Image: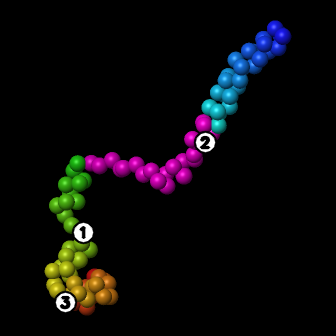
Amino acid sequence: MNLLMFLLFALLLTVPCCCEGASSNALDEGIKIDQEKANTFIRRQKRAYPYSERYYEMFKSPMEMRQEQCEHYAPCNYYSEIVGFPTAYRRYFGSI
């Protein structure tokens, strides 16, 4: 009877140690994902330089200036909603 109690007690002490190691390995394997999958939903912001941001705020691209010109002219703006900006701009202002 003493031997049986001793074996049960030893078994109770070893079970948590065995289970703890197995569960931590399973958790470690479940957390790891490869870099391509991680990059599909996490994008790092690019480093911004203060002078480049000011430059782009001061000077607009030629395409953006053309779009604003078309937006301010009502017939071009209306026609661009129907056929698209490049076609509307060509019709009212010439080539792009």
Number of the label disc, if any, that sits on residue 61: 1
In what quadrant of the picture does the N terminus appear?
A: top right
Tell me which residue sits at (75%, 19%) in the image.
11
Which quadrant holds residue 29?
top right
Spatial separation of the CA atoms under disc 2 and disc 1: 48 Å
Tell me which residue sits at (45%, 50%) in the image.
42
Q: Secondary structure at mark 3?
A: helix
Residue 24 image offset from top left, x and y in percent: 62, 32
Tell me which residue sits at (15%, 80%) in the image.
72
Q: Is residue 22 above or below residue 66?
A: above
Task: Find the magenta span and give its range.
Answer: 27-49
Q: Is residue 24 left or right of residue 63?
A: right
Of badges 1 and 3, the one in the foreground is: 3
Local crowd size for mark 3, using a 10 Å CA cut-off: few (<14), some (14–19), many (≥20): few
Circle 2 is placed at which residue position?
30
Tell me which residue sits at (77%, 17%) in the image.
8
Residue 32 image offset from top left, x and y in percent: 58, 42
In what quadrant of the picture does the C terminus appear?
A: bottom left
Q: Are marks 1 and 3 in contact (CB under 8 Å)?
A: no
